[in-house]
Image (cartoon, helix red, strand yellow):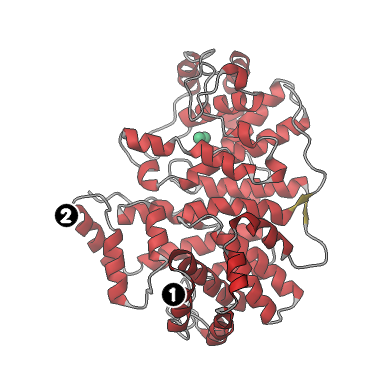
Amino acid sequence: MPAAVRRDAFVRLAEVISALTYALDLTEGQRPGHTLRTALIAMRVGRELALDEQALAALYYAALLKDSGCSSNAARLSALFGSDDQRVKRDMRLVDWHDRWKLAMRTARNCGIGRNPVARLSHFLRIARTPSMTRDIIQTRCERGAQIALVLGFPLETSEAIGHVDEHWCGLGHPAGLAGDEIPLLSRILLLAQTVEVQWSEEGLTTAMAMARQRRGRWFEPRLVDLLTTWQGDHAWWRMLADDEALESRVLGLEPGSEPLQATDERVDRIAYAFSAVIDAKTPFTARHSTNVASFAVCIAGAMGADADTRRDLLRGGLLHDIGKLGVSNRILDKPGRLTDAELVEVRKHPRWSKDILGRVAAFHGFAAEASQHHERLDGTGYPWQLSASQLGPMARVLAVADVYEALTADRPYRAGLPVGSALDLMRRDRGTAFDPAVFDAAAVLAEQGTFAALADTGGTPFPDLHAMPARFAPVAAVA
Ligand SMILES: [Fe+2]
Ligand SMILES: [Fe+2]
């Protein structure tokens, strides 16, 4: 296999994480850049409060990772509401939960979208009869996000800020119902920043400021609202916030500390593993798909004589090849039956999103396109680009084989994985039309030797703390 494109000697940690936050925005149904704008608002609050550099650094990374647990509740939310999880998440973020009437109305509006009135009502009643539902869903997201910050090596302060981001000043928030000063200061700042950003993005500055004042002393700490609302007339600053092109560079420019944090290769690998856990937590049907695909792909490449740089790119490409799936609704991903043509169109968008997201990370430029081509076929009938054999590089060919083999052999909640021989027989029919013959042959030898099964059993990750994270909530049965 040809050598990979050499990566930069130094990779900036904030640059990698900032770029990947677009995947989190996609999962949350937020306008692209939501996380970065939240970080800009939070950092201005932090600086005006004269927080020390250590607290600012903790706030900075907490803002970037605040939604890293977001995929872990998507399946549950989608099943409960019977609607697209991203749409529910976006819409429910706009409502003042303390107003039970408004909450009920907003919940009803999001139940069973596109379904008949009986189905909509049954979803609504199920939610109404489960008062702990909101807390459970938020708790999952917060705990998961807090864990991810820790395994990425950020301090406890960052992790705690994420873990309590939905606590409200009056004590009616989640997951712990903390009140006032019991809530970590960084969480108080993040809650105000993210809520203002959502309202500002959806309904403009005046509405966002009115919302902050209305919720002063209930959701938000009064002195933080008093500080933030003084910016209302700072039109230049809000125009800056609206400049999508310069968003990432502005966030990078705000990184606290005298020197930007550099990420070693090991740390970038860890980030890729952490985001693969975010991807795999999206749906109960893909427990270890990304880590397995990555380890199978690296193994195949090793057997074919690939060098260390190529194998490292394959590892990261394999871990992140399905990152675009974070933008696909769980209503479709978790559907038990056959997908409609319209649903297939939606699912088949995910490689384009993978390419867009990975292409934002300079350290991933060498493989962003090829990793996204894992559903292309040699005969040009794959998706989404229908590339021909001459356009498919070695990484795309290896990932295509690893991806299908993993999907066929992994156990799913609704069926056991195929035995090795059956999976290979099925794939052999497409040897030379879908799959590169040399790649398929190398993979078949490894599969028959039991190498892939052993890798899948260990989770294939060199980071046991990441592997040990609980995968997600158990899926919720769909409402008839
Ligand atoms: Fe895929
Ligand atoms: Fe995949």
Give, as a three-letter code, the residue at label 2.
Val
Query: Of circles 1 and 2, which is in front?
Result: 1
> Under 8 Å from ligand 1: the CB of mark 1?
no
Q: Which mark is residue 221?
A: none
Closer-to-camera residue (67/94) = 94
- Of residues 356 and 319, the one nearer the viewer is 356
Q: In the drawing, does residue 26 fall left or right of residue 272?
A: left
Who's the residue at 66% across and 76% down the image? Answer: 46
Q: Residue at x 37, y 78 (%)?
A: 98
Residue 8 percent location from the top left of the image? 79, 42
Query: Which residue is identified by label 1?
Result: 207
Picture quarter containing residue 402?
A: top right
Q: Secondary structure at mark 2?
A: helix
Q: Which of the numbered marks, if any, corresponds to residue 118?
A: 2
User: How far apart in space, not on screen, are marks 1 and 2 (Cα)?
Assistant: 35 Å
Judged left or right of residue 216, residue 114 is left
Amino acid on which the number 1 mark rests in the picture: Thr
Q: Work out whether residue 455 can be spotted.
A: no
Q: Is residue 388 visible?
A: yes
Q: Position of residue 221 (x, y in %)?
A: 53, 84
Q: Is residue 353 above or below residue 157?
A: above
Q: Residue at x 31, y 34 (%)?
A: 340
Question: Is 270 or 355 nearer to us in this picture?
Answer: 355
